[in-house]
Image: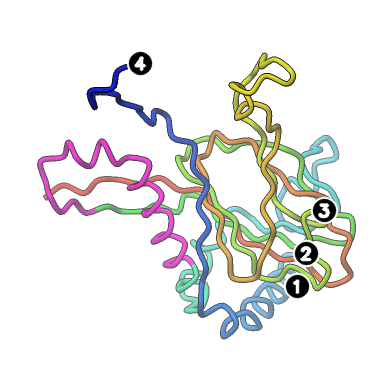
């Protein structure tokens, strides 16, 4: 082992999941929930996936169409939530692309966060979403609007699956970091989770009596020219 200070450890293909908190959430929660109730009244059939008998990606829930923000761009509360989401996604992107940022000639680059798809989900009792990943985007997220009073790690939480195969030996210490199959995040109202789009994720079945409501979005980020 070298001891002359020349050792280097590189963080390549960083796998990061971010947690961000909207401190204004308690002020806007009721308005968001009322907005979603009105949306569901106007569009009770919801997303076309709900009508597809062959689709098995989710169960016992209501899901809006994928253009939630675009269709309701004049809704001030929703716009503020997505500003918070976009800001958080940009923080994640800068963290993951630190080396690329250092190589830019522009010392103060500007970016545009594009919300390509956005939707909300209301879980009925027993509702869940099977593991899946998202395409045509770089970052995904979930924002917890209402989680239910008995929400817990085994009740409606979001989980991520290990994104690589492993043949680590049982009991061998060196590969301990490879042995974890899932990572589970507790839901908290006003919390936003952000992760890279390739990461397989889903939700544990929700068994609460109160509606569990989340907002999700897919995004890309463009570097703006001078």
Does label 3 or label 1 sit earlier along the sequence? 1
Cα distance, mark 4 to mark 2? 65 Å
Cα distance, mark 3 to mark 1? 30 Å
Whether the magenta-drawn stretch holds residue 94 is answered as yes
Cα distance, mark 1 to mark 4? 66 Å
Residue located beneath label 2 in the image: 44
Instruction: Look at the image and tell me in which quarter the N terminus lies.
Output: top left
Q: Residue at x 47, y 49 (%)?
A: 116
Nearest to viewer (mark 3 / mark 1): 3
- Residue density around tag 4, few if under 14, some if 14–19, many if 20 or more, within 10 Å: few
The part of the image, by quadrant, that contains residue 63 is bottom right
Does label 4 or label 2 sit earlier along the sequence? 4
Does label 1 or label 4 sit earlier along the sequence? 4
Task: Kindly state the secondary structure of the residue where label 3 is placed.
Answer: loop
The percent position of residue 155, horizontal first and vertical second, equals 82, 57
Nearest to viewer (mark 3 / mark 2): 3
Nearest to viewer (mark 4 / mark 2): 4
Question: Is 154 drawn above or below residue 146 in the view shown?
Answer: above
Whether the magenta-drawn stretch holds residue 55 is answered as no
- Residue density around tag 1, few if under 14, some if 14–19, many if 20 or more, within 10 Å: few
- Residue density around tag 2, few if under 14, some if 14–19, many if 20 or more, within 10 Å: few
Residue located beneath label 3 in the image: 154
Task: Kindly state the secondary structure of the residue where label 1 is placed.
Answer: helix
What range is drawn magenta here?
A: 82-110
Does label 3 or label 2 sit earlier along the sequence? 2
Give the residue at the far bottom of this rendering.
Answer: 27
Cα distance, mark 4 to mark 3? 44 Å
Residue located beneath label 4 in the image: 1
The part of the image, by quadrant, that contains residue 34 is bottom right
């Amino acid at each position: 082992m070298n001891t002359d200070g020349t050792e280097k450890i590189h963080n390549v293909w960083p796998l990061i999941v971010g947690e961000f908190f909207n401190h204004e959430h308690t002020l806007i929660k009721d308005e968001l929930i009322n907005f979603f109730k009105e949306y569901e009244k106007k569009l009770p059939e919801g997303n076309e996936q709900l009508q597809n008998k062959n689709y098995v990606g989710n169960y016992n829930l209501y899901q809006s169409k994928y253009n939630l923000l675009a269709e309701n761009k004049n809704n001030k509360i929703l716009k503020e939530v997505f500003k918070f989401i976009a800001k958080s996604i940009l923080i994640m992107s800068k963290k993951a692309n630190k080396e690329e940022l250092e190589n830019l000639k522009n010392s103060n680059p500007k970016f545009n966060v594009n919300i390509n798809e956005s939707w909300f989900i209301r879980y009925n009792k027993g509702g869940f979403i099977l593991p899946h990943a998202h395409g045509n985007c770089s970052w995904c997220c979930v924002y917890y609007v209402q989680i239910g009073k008995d929400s817990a790690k085994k009740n409606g939480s979001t989980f991520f699956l290990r994104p690589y195969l492993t043949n680590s030996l049982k009991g061998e210490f060196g590969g301990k970091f490879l042995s974890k199959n899932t990572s589970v995040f507790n839901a908290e109202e006003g919390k936003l989770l952000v992760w890279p789009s390739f990461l397989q994720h889903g939700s544990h079945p929700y068994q609460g009596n109160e509606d569990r409501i989340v907002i999700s979005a897919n995004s890309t980020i463009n570097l703006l020219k001078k």
